[in-house]
Image (cartoon, grey):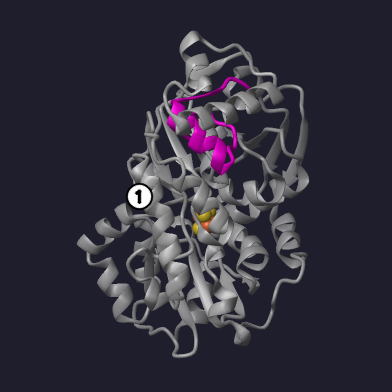
């Protein structure tokens, strides 16, 4: 990969240790993918923040970068806990103190402690066509597809390296020729609920392999919540990083193979989820907010909880960003939900929380991404349910 004189100086260490290490990562990545050069980015979203994922080694690595400073707006992925309310979640003190140290180490690099998988609802909102380096998989799909920004799915170290240099290697989805759809998915039913979009995304991710870009046709209307649900589920099963759709003003590729998604497909996806728990009586925690809940979703949940109360033996945990939480608090939604026994956490992802070591065994969720990662990362059994049934499982 070609480097400018200034980039070469960074690589030689003339701008300090952190930038040198960052440039080494970008050069290795650029050489691997045969990138021609580095291009400037406008923002970064950095994974590798949860103590569950990076452990002591990762913490030490970030703390060693103390002489660096990011060049662009940079936010973080969610953690395994709310930074203020970790003790209410049941997170052990030792885990929490390591987690706080990780976030503080990132903050010393100039990274904002905005820990969310919906950075676009929290001030990290790239403009169409801009190059960015994001790592959270649902946010990557959303950014490429809905926001029309351009990013590869970065790992934690490469997103951090891009933030420290303000550049990323020019390859993959940064190139227009790699952003064209080649398969069409025809939706032949009216999708109404957000959870149905999660099933659509899961189906597309299961059928198509990473690198393929689908065109979704037949959608009649689609709000932000539905688009983030489809983005998240698609990324969890197939490693897909982008889709196009008629509702986003994209053009159908012609000719192309066409797959169909109808009511029987939706039913088949749910009925064939491997090891999906079917006994609702065994659920001890219901988690909603994957990706982090929007204000409208919190409003819907508050509405569904009206006249009900969370059961004594089931937790109802809701996950959102601090920005949305503040707005919900101002609107009275936080009080409404908390007063009937719901718990709302910020900064956190339930899949990254040590749920099984806290003692939870079975989680119900309306997100197939959470269904997938709950069992693989948090160590609990999982049950997928429509949102309204999640609420009725958690409350009476
Ligand atoms: Fe966000 Fe965690 Fe889901 S990072 S998209 S809540 S798996």
Label 1 residue SS:
loop
Return the residue nearer the eye: 204 or 369.
369
- Locate residue 108, reporting x and y percent: 34, 44
Is 66 situated above or below 55?
above
- Magenta stretch contains residue 124: no
Query: Within the image, what quadrant is residue 217 found in?
Result: top right
Q: Which residue is mark 1?
A: 113
Residue at the image point whose x is 74% and y is 55% from the top: 265
Which quadrant of the rendered structure holds the N terminus? top right
Asked whether 352 or 345 is in front, the reply is 352
- Which residues make up the magenta segment? 146-171
Q: Residue at x 56, y 62 (%)?
A: 52
In the visual, does 52 lie left or right of 276? left
Please give left or right for residue 71 compared with residue 79 in the image.
left
**Residue 223 visible:** no
The residue positioned 57% from the left and 50% from the top of the image is 232
What is the quadrant of the C terminus in the image? bottom left
Q: Is residue 84 above or below residue 70?
A: below
């Amino acid at each position: 990969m070609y480097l400018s004189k200034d980039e070469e100086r960074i690589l030689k260490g003339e701008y300090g240790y952190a930038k040198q290490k960052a440039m080494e990562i970008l050069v290795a990545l650029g050489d691997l993918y045969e990138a021609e050069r580095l291009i400037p980015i406008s923002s970064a979203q950095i994974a590798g923040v949860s103590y569950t994922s990076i452990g002591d080694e990762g913490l030490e690595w970030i703390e060693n970068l103390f002489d660096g400073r990011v060049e662009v707006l940079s936010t973080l992925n969610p953690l395994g806990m709310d930074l203020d309310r970790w003790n209410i979640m049941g997170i052990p003190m030792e885990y929490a103190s390591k987690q706080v140290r990780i976030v503080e180490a990132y903050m010393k690099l100039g990274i904002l402690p905005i820990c969310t998988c919906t950075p676009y609802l929290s001030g990290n909102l790239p403009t169409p066509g801009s190059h960015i380096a994001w790592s959270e998989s649902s946010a990557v799909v959303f950014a490429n597809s809905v926001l029309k920004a351009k990013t590869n799915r970065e790992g934690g170290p490469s997103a951090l390296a891009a933030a420290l240099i303000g550049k990323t290697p020019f390859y993959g989805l940064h190139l227009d020729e790699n952003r064209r759809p080649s398969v069409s998915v025809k939706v032949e039913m009216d999708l109404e609920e957000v959870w149905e979009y999660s099933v659509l995304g899961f189906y597309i991710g299961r059928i198509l392999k990473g690198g393929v870009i689908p065109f979704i046709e037949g959608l009649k209307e689609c709000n932000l919540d539905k688009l983030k649900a489809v983005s998240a589920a698609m990324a969890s099963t197939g490693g897909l990083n982008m889709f196009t759709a008629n509702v986003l003003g994209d053009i159908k590729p012609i000719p192309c193979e066409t797959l169909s998604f109808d009511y029987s497909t939706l039913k088949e996806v749910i009925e064939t989820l491997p090891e999906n728990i079917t006994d609702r009586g065994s659920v001890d925690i219901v988690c909603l907010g994957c990706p982090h809940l929007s204000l409208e979703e919190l409003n819907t949940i508050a509405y569904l909880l009206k006249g009900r109360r969370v059961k004594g033996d089931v937790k109802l945990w809701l996950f959102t960003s601090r920005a949305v939480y503040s707005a919900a608090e101002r609107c009275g939604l936080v009080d409404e939900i908390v007063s009937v026994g719901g718990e709302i956490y910020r900064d956190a992802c339930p899949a990254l929380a040590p749920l099984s070591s806290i003692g939870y065994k079975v989680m119900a969720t309306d997100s197939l991404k959470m269904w997938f990662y709950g069992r693989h990362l948090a160590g609990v059994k999982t049950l997928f349910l429509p949102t309204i049934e999640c609420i009725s499982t958690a409350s009476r």
